[in-house]
Image (cartoon, helix red, strand yellow):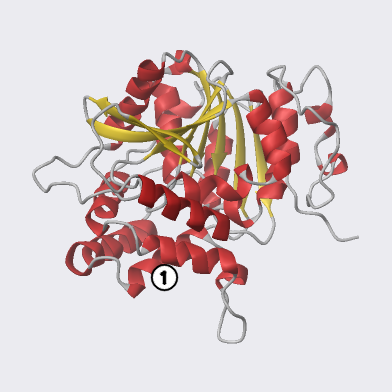
Protein backbone atom coordinates (compact mmCIF):
# COMPACT_ATOMS: atom_id res chain seq x y z
CA UNK A 1 0.00 0.00 0.00
CA UNK A 2 2.95 2.36 0.49
CA UNK A 3 3.32 2.81 -3.25
CA UNK A 4 -0.32 3.85 -3.46
CA UNK A 5 0.01 6.32 -0.59
CA UNK A 6 3.01 8.00 -2.20
CA UNK A 7 1.20 8.21 -5.49
CA UNK A 8 -1.95 9.60 -3.92
CA UNK A 9 0.16 12.27 -2.24
CA UNK A 10 1.88 13.07 -5.53
CA UNK A 11 -1.57 13.42 -7.07
CA UNK A 12 -2.59 15.73 -4.24
CA UNK A 13 0.47 17.92 -4.84
CA UNK A 14 -0.24 18.09 -8.56
CA UNK A 15 -3.96 18.84 -8.17
CA UNK A 16 -3.97 21.28 -5.26
CA UNK A 17 -5.22 24.09 -7.50
CA UNK A 18 -8.74 24.49 -8.84
CA UNK A 19 -9.84 22.19 -11.66
CA UNK A 20 -12.42 23.09 -14.30
CA UNK A 21 -15.06 20.70 -15.46
CA UNK A 22 -13.87 18.27 -18.18
CA UNK A 23 -10.23 19.31 -17.71
CA UNK A 24 -7.78 16.42 -17.99
CA UNK A 25 -5.09 16.10 -15.32
CA UNK A 26 -1.90 14.14 -15.91
CA UNK A 27 -0.88 12.23 -12.82
CA UNK A 28 1.70 9.53 -12.10
CA UNK A 29 -1.09 6.97 -11.93
CA UNK A 30 -3.00 7.76 -15.10
CA UNK A 31 -5.01 10.54 -16.67
CA UNK A 32 -7.76 11.92 -14.49
CA UNK A 33 -10.96 13.29 -16.05
CA UNK A 34 -13.66 15.21 -14.25
CA UNK A 35 -16.78 14.21 -16.17
CA UNK A 36 -19.90 16.34 -15.89
CA UNK A 37 -23.10 14.29 -15.78
CA UNK A 38 -26.76 15.03 -15.23
CA UNK A 39 -26.28 13.93 -11.61
CA UNK A 40 -23.15 15.97 -10.99
CA UNK A 41 -19.45 15.55 -11.70
CA UNK A 42 -17.65 12.24 -11.35
CA UNK A 43 -13.91 11.54 -11.37
CA UNK A 44 -12.62 8.93 -13.82
CA UNK A 45 -8.95 7.92 -13.98
CA UNK A 46 -7.84 6.25 -17.19
CA UNK A 47 -4.92 3.85 -17.57
CA UNK A 48 -3.65 2.57 -20.89
CA UNK A 49 -4.41 2.78 -24.58
CA UNK A 50 -7.94 4.04 -25.17
CA UNK A 51 -8.07 2.14 -28.47
CA UNK A 52 -8.22 -1.09 -26.47
CA UNK A 53 -11.42 -2.61 -25.04
CA UNK A 54 -12.63 -0.92 -21.86
CA UNK A 55 -12.60 -2.33 -18.34
CA UNK A 56 -14.62 -0.15 -15.93
CA UNK A 57 -14.06 -0.40 -12.17
CA UNK A 58 -16.12 0.86 -9.22
CA UNK A 59 -14.89 0.65 -5.60
CA UNK A 60 -16.60 0.02 -2.29
CA UNK A 61 -17.77 2.56 0.27
CA UNK A 62 -15.21 5.13 1.52
CA UNK A 63 -12.38 3.95 -0.76
CA UNK A 64 -11.31 4.98 -4.23
CA UNK A 65 -9.57 3.07 -7.00
CA UNK A 66 -6.12 3.48 -5.41
CA UNK A 67 -7.13 1.98 -2.08
CA UNK A 68 -9.47 -0.66 -3.54
CA UNK A 69 -7.81 -2.00 -6.72
CA UNK A 70 -4.09 -1.25 -6.48
CA UNK A 71 -3.24 -4.62 -4.91
CA UNK A 72 -4.60 -6.31 -8.02
CA UNK A 73 -3.49 -3.87 -10.69
CA UNK A 74 -0.01 -3.23 -9.30
CA UNK A 75 1.09 -6.86 -9.30
CA UNK A 76 3.10 -7.73 -12.47
CA UNK A 77 0.88 -10.66 -13.41
CA UNK A 78 -2.24 -8.48 -13.44
CA UNK A 79 -0.49 -5.83 -15.49
CA UNK A 80 0.45 -8.38 -18.13
CA UNK A 81 -3.08 -9.77 -18.15
CA UNK A 82 -5.31 -6.72 -17.73
CA UNK A 83 -3.33 -3.78 -19.09
CA UNK A 84 -2.26 -5.85 -22.08
CA UNK A 85 -5.89 -6.42 -23.03
CA UNK A 86 -7.73 -3.37 -21.71
CA UNK A 87 -7.81 0.34 -21.15
CA UNK A 88 -8.86 0.73 -17.51
CA UNK A 89 -11.47 3.33 -16.54
CA UNK A 90 -11.55 3.72 -12.74
CA UNK A 91 -14.80 5.46 -11.76
CA UNK A 92 -14.72 7.01 -8.30
CA UNK A 93 -17.98 7.52 -6.35
CA UNK A 94 -18.87 11.23 -6.08
CA UNK A 95 -16.78 12.92 -3.40
CA UNK A 96 -14.43 9.93 -2.94
CA UNK A 97 -11.67 11.18 -5.24
CA UNK A 98 -8.36 12.37 -3.82
CA UNK A 99 -8.60 15.91 -2.45
CA UNK A 100 -12.38 16.06 -2.87
CA UNK A 101 -14.15 18.91 -1.12
CA UNK A 102 -17.22 18.29 1.01
CA UNK A 103 -20.35 18.06 -1.12
CA UNK A 104 -22.72 20.93 -0.50
CA UNK A 105 -25.65 20.06 1.78
CA UNK A 106 -27.87 21.74 -0.80
CA UNK A 107 -27.07 19.01 -3.33
CA UNK A 108 -29.54 16.11 -3.26
CA UNK A 109 -28.30 12.71 -2.09
CA UNK A 110 -27.94 10.54 -5.18
CA UNK A 111 -29.82 7.26 -5.30
CA UNK A 112 -28.36 3.95 -6.42
CA UNK A 113 -30.17 4.41 -9.74
CA UNK A 114 -28.59 7.85 -10.15
CA UNK A 115 -25.13 6.35 -9.62
CA UNK A 116 -25.82 3.62 -12.19
CA UNK A 117 -27.05 6.22 -14.68
CA UNK A 118 -23.85 8.20 -14.13
CA UNK A 119 -21.89 5.22 -15.47
CA UNK A 120 -23.87 5.34 -18.70
CA UNK A 121 -23.01 9.02 -19.09
CA UNK A 122 -19.34 8.29 -18.40
CA UNK A 123 -19.30 5.70 -21.19
CA UNK A 124 -20.91 8.22 -23.53
CA UNK A 125 -18.32 10.84 -22.56
CA UNK A 126 -15.48 8.54 -23.61
CA UNK A 127 -17.32 7.21 -26.67
CA UNK A 128 -17.38 3.66 -25.34
CA UNK A 129 -19.72 0.89 -26.43
CA UNK A 130 -19.97 -2.38 -24.50
CA UNK A 131 -17.50 -2.74 -21.62
CA UNK A 132 -16.30 -5.25 -19.05
CA UNK A 133 -17.00 -4.21 -15.44
CA UNK A 134 -15.27 -4.94 -12.12
CA UNK A 135 -16.71 -3.81 -8.79
CA UNK A 136 -16.21 -4.45 -5.08
CA UNK A 137 -19.17 -4.82 -2.66
CA UNK A 138 -21.18 -1.57 -3.02
CA UNK A 139 -19.45 -0.93 -6.36
CA UNK A 140 -20.36 -4.46 -7.44
CA UNK A 141 -24.02 -3.74 -6.67
CA UNK A 142 -23.95 -0.52 -8.71
CA UNK A 143 -22.34 -2.24 -11.68
CA UNK A 144 -24.83 -5.13 -11.47
CA UNK A 145 -27.69 -2.63 -11.48
CA UNK A 146 -26.05 -0.85 -14.40
CA UNK A 147 -25.84 -4.15 -16.30
CA UNK A 148 -29.53 -4.78 -15.64
CA UNK A 149 -30.56 -1.30 -16.81
CA UNK A 150 -28.17 -1.06 -19.77
CA UNK A 151 -27.73 -4.65 -20.90
CA UNK A 152 -26.26 -3.82 -24.29
CA UNK A 153 -23.43 -1.88 -22.66
CA UNK A 154 -22.01 -4.71 -20.51
CA UNK A 155 -20.02 -7.61 -21.95
CA UNK A 156 -19.22 -9.17 -18.60
CA UNK A 157 -19.05 -8.65 -14.84
CA UNK A 158 -16.28 -9.39 -12.35
CA UNK A 159 -17.88 -8.91 -8.94
CA UNK A 160 -15.98 -9.04 -5.64
CA UNK A 161 -17.97 -9.77 -2.46
CA UNK A 162 -21.05 -8.27 -4.12
CA UNK A 163 -24.28 -7.01 -2.63
CA UNK A 164 -27.52 -7.87 -4.39
CA UNK A 165 -30.37 -7.85 -1.86
CA UNK A 166 -31.81 -5.08 0.28
CA UNK A 167 -29.87 -4.65 3.55
CA UNK A 168 -30.41 -7.33 6.19
CA UNK A 169 -31.34 -6.22 9.69
CA UNK A 170 -27.72 -6.67 10.75
CA UNK A 171 -26.35 -4.61 7.90
CA UNK A 172 -29.07 -1.99 8.37
CA UNK A 173 -28.09 -1.65 12.04
CA UNK A 174 -24.37 -1.30 11.25
CA UNK A 175 -25.10 1.19 8.48
CA UNK A 176 -27.38 3.21 10.76
CA UNK A 177 -24.71 3.40 13.48
CA UNK A 178 -22.05 4.35 10.97
CA UNK A 179 -24.31 6.90 9.29
CA UNK A 180 -25.07 8.66 12.60
CA UNK A 181 -21.41 8.66 13.61
CA UNK A 182 -20.35 10.10 10.25
CA UNK A 183 -23.03 12.78 10.38
CA UNK A 184 -22.36 13.95 13.94
CA UNK A 185 -18.71 13.02 14.61
CA UNK A 186 -17.07 12.57 11.21
CA UNK A 187 -14.42 9.95 10.49
CA UNK A 188 -13.97 8.92 14.12
CA UNK A 189 -12.18 5.82 15.37
CA UNK A 190 -15.30 3.66 15.58
CA UNK A 191 -16.28 4.43 11.98
CA UNK A 192 -12.83 3.41 10.80
CA UNK A 193 -13.05 0.15 12.75
CA UNK A 194 -16.45 -0.63 11.21
CA UNK A 195 -15.10 0.06 7.72
CA UNK A 196 -11.95 -2.00 8.23
CA UNK A 197 -14.09 -4.87 9.50
CA UNK A 198 -16.16 -4.50 6.32
CA UNK A 199 -13.06 -4.74 4.10
CA UNK A 200 -10.62 -7.15 5.71
CA UNK A 201 -10.47 -10.47 7.53
CA UNK A 202 -9.56 -10.71 11.20
CA UNK A 203 -6.18 -12.21 10.27
CA UNK A 204 -4.93 -8.99 8.66
CA UNK A 205 -6.76 -6.63 11.04
CA UNK A 206 -4.69 -8.07 13.87
CA UNK A 207 -5.39 -8.41 17.59
CA UNK A 208 -3.83 -7.63 20.94
CA UNK A 209 -1.12 -10.21 20.24
CA UNK A 210 -0.80 -9.70 16.47
CA UNK A 211 -0.21 -6.22 14.95
CA UNK A 212 -2.23 -4.89 12.04
CA UNK A 213 -0.87 -5.71 8.62
CA UNK A 214 0.67 -2.97 6.49
CA UNK A 215 -2.34 -3.02 4.18
CA UNK A 216 -4.75 -2.26 7.06
CA UNK A 217 -2.52 0.46 8.50
CA UNK A 218 -2.30 2.14 5.10
CA UNK A 219 -6.07 1.91 4.57
CA UNK A 220 -6.64 3.42 8.02
CA UNK A 221 -4.47 6.43 7.06
CA UNK A 222 -6.26 6.85 3.75
CA UNK A 223 -9.65 6.89 5.47
CA UNK A 224 -8.49 9.93 7.45
CA UNK A 225 -8.24 11.85 4.16
CA UNK A 226 -11.86 11.28 3.14
CA UNK A 227 -14.63 13.82 3.67
CA UNK A 228 -17.04 12.21 6.12
CA UNK A 229 -20.10 13.90 4.62
CA UNK A 230 -19.28 12.45 1.21
CA UNK A 231 -18.99 8.95 2.66
CA UNK A 232 -22.27 9.52 4.51
CA UNK A 233 -24.02 10.37 1.24
CA UNK A 234 -22.78 7.19 -0.47
CA UNK A 235 -23.74 5.12 2.57
CA UNK A 236 -27.24 6.58 2.52
CA UNK A 237 -27.64 5.51 -1.10
CA UNK A 238 -26.38 1.98 -0.40
CA UNK A 239 -28.63 1.61 2.64
CA UNK A 240 -31.71 2.37 0.52
CA UNK A 241 -30.88 -0.09 -2.26
CA UNK A 242 -33.62 -2.38 -3.59
CA UNK A 243 -33.36 -6.15 -3.97
CA UNK A 244 -32.05 -7.16 -7.41
CA UNK A 245 -32.69 -10.89 -7.01
CA UNK A 246 -35.65 -11.16 -9.37
CA UNK A 247 -33.79 -9.61 -12.29
CA UNK A 248 -30.57 -11.60 -11.97
CA UNK A 249 -31.83 -14.61 -13.92
CA UNK A 250 -32.32 -12.39 -16.98
CA UNK A 251 -28.76 -11.07 -16.76
CA UNK A 252 -27.02 -13.04 -19.50
CA UNK A 253 -23.64 -11.36 -19.56
CA UNK A 254 -20.78 -13.58 -18.40
CA UNK A 255 -20.14 -13.09 -14.70
CA UNK A 256 -17.28 -14.11 -12.41
CA UNK A 257 -17.93 -13.66 -8.70
CA UNK A 258 -15.24 -13.66 -6.00
CA UNK A 259 -15.97 -13.66 -2.30
CA UNK A 260 -13.72 -13.85 0.74
CA UNK A 261 -14.49 -16.76 3.03
CA UNK A 262 -14.63 -14.35 5.97
CA UNK A 263 -16.48 -11.53 4.22
CA UNK A 264 -19.51 -10.13 6.07
CA UNK A 265 -21.24 -10.37 2.68
CA UNK A 266 -20.41 -14.01 1.97
CA UNK A 267 -24.08 -15.06 2.09
CA UNK A 268 -24.94 -12.23 -0.34
CA UNK A 269 -22.51 -13.61 -2.92
CA UNK A 270 -23.86 -17.14 -2.50
CA UNK A 271 -27.41 -15.83 -2.89
CA UNK A 272 -26.43 -13.85 -5.98
CA UNK A 273 -24.86 -16.84 -7.75
CA UNK A 274 -27.91 -18.97 -6.89
CA UNK A 275 -30.14 -16.50 -8.72
CA UNK A 276 -27.96 -16.12 -11.83
CA UNK A 277 -28.02 -18.32 -14.90
CA UNK A 278 -25.35 -20.96 -14.21
CA UNK A 279 -24.47 -21.11 -17.91
CA UNK A 280 -22.92 -17.66 -17.63
CA UNK A 281 -21.67 -17.40 -14.04
CA UNK A 282 -19.08 -18.83 -11.65
CA UNK A 283 -18.26 -18.36 -7.97
CA UNK A 284 -14.75 -18.34 -6.52
CA UNK A 285 -14.49 -18.49 -2.73
CA UNK A 286 -11.13 -17.28 -1.41
CA UNK A 287 -9.97 -18.79 1.86
CA UNK A 288 -8.91 -16.71 4.86
CA UNK A 289 -9.94 -13.47 3.20
CA UNK A 290 -12.36 -10.61 3.86
CA UNK A 291 -14.46 -8.68 1.35
CA UNK A 292 -11.70 -6.76 -0.41
CA UNK A 293 -10.07 -9.69 -2.20
CA UNK A 294 -8.48 -7.22 -4.64
CA UNK A 295 -6.25 -5.97 -1.80
CA UNK A 296 -5.99 -8.84 0.65
CA UNK A 297 -5.41 -11.75 -1.75
CA UNK A 298 -5.19 -10.36 -5.30
CA UNK A 299 -3.18 -13.31 -6.62
CA UNK A 300 -6.14 -15.58 -5.91
CA UNK A 301 -7.99 -13.72 -8.66
CA UNK A 302 -5.48 -14.06 -11.47
CA UNK A 303 -6.03 -17.56 -12.84
CA UNK A 304 -9.86 -17.44 -12.72
CA UNK A 305 -9.79 -14.04 -14.47
CA UNK A 306 -7.37 -15.37 -17.07
CA UNK A 307 -9.64 -18.27 -18.00
CA UNK A 308 -12.69 -16.01 -17.82
CA UNK A 309 -11.12 -13.59 -20.32
CA UNK A 310 -10.28 -16.43 -22.71
CA UNK A 311 -14.00 -16.66 -23.33
CA UNK A 312 -13.76 -13.19 -24.87
CA UNK A 313 -10.77 -14.11 -27.04
CA UNK A 314 -8.36 -12.27 -24.74
CA UNK A 315 -5.15 -13.72 -23.34
CA UNK A 316 -2.07 -13.14 -21.20
CA UNK A 317 0.94 -12.14 -23.37
CA UNK A 318 3.18 -14.61 -21.51
CA UNK A 319 2.18 -18.11 -20.51
CA UNK A 320 3.90 -18.11 -17.13
CA UNK A 321 1.72 -18.61 -14.05
CA UNK A 322 2.56 -16.91 -10.79
CA UNK A 323 3.95 -19.40 -8.26
CA UNK A 324 2.54 -17.13 -5.56
CA UNK A 325 -1.03 -17.75 -6.62
CA UNK A 326 -2.99 -20.02 -4.23
CA UNK A 327 -4.84 -21.24 -7.29
CA UNK A 328 -3.66 -23.71 -9.89
CA UNK A 329 -5.51 -25.18 -12.89
CA UNK A 330 -6.26 -28.34 -10.90
CA UNK A 331 -8.35 -26.25 -8.47
CA UNK A 332 -10.70 -25.23 -11.26
CA UNK A 333 -13.68 -27.19 -12.47
CA UNK A 334 -12.85 -29.25 -15.61
CA UNK A 335 -16.01 -27.89 -17.23
CA UNK A 336 -14.65 -24.35 -16.85
CA UNK A 337 -11.39 -25.28 -18.57
CA UNK A 338 -12.94 -27.09 -21.53
CA UNK A 339 -12.72 -25.08 -24.79
CA UNK A 340 -16.43 -25.27 -25.53
CA UNK A 341 -17.31 -24.03 -22.05
CA UNK A 342 -14.57 -21.52 -21.34
CA UNK A 343 -16.23 -18.21 -20.63
CA UNK A 344 -19.58 -19.56 -21.75
CA UNK A 345 -20.65 -22.24 -19.29
CA UNK A 346 -18.85 -21.24 -16.13
CA UNK A 347 -19.42 -23.55 -13.17
CA UNK A 348 -19.32 -22.72 -9.47
CA UNK A 349 -15.75 -23.18 -8.25
CA UNK A 350 -13.96 -22.72 -4.95
CA UNK A 351 -10.40 -22.31 -3.79
CA UNK A 352 -11.28 -24.30 -0.68
CA UNK A 353 -9.56 -27.70 -0.61
CA UNK A 354 -10.97 -30.75 1.10
CA UNK A 355 -9.08 -32.70 3.72
CA UNK A 356 -8.27 -36.28 2.88
Furthest toward the bottom, the residue is 209
In this view, the residue in front, 233 or 262, is 233
Q: Split into 4 quadrants, where in the image is the C terminus?
A: bottom right
Counting labels gives 1
Is residue 245 visible to the viewer in this orientation of the structure?
no
Query: Residue 265's spot in the image, x, y percent?
Result: 50, 53
Query: Residue 341's spot in the image, x, y percent?
Result: 77, 21
Mark 1 = which residue? Answer: 193
Q: Is residue 81 left or right of residue 56?
A: right
Residue for point 66% across, 54% down = 297
Residue for point 50% across, 56% down = 6
Furthest toward the right, the residue is 356
Q: Secondary structure at mark 1?
A: helix
Residue for point 49% across, 51% down = 7
Q: Label 1 crowding class (10 Å Cα cut-off): few <14, some 14-19, many 20+?
A: few
Query: Residue 66's spot in the image, x, y percent?
Result: 49, 48
Residue 108, quarter of the rendered image: top left
Residue for point 55% across, 53% down = 292
Q: Split into 4 quadrants, where in the image is the N terminus?
A: bottom right
Residue 147, quarter of the rendered image: top left
Amino acid sequence: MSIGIDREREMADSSSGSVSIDMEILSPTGKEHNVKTFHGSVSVTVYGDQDKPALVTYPDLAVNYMSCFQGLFFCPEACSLLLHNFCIYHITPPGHELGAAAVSPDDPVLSIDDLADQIDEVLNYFGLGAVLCMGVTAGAYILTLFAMKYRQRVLGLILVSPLCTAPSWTEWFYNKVMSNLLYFYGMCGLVKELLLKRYFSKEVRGSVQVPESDIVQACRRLLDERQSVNIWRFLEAISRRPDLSEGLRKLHCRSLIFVGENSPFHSEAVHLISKMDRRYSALVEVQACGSMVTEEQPHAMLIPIEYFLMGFGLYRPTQSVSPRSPLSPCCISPELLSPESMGLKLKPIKTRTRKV
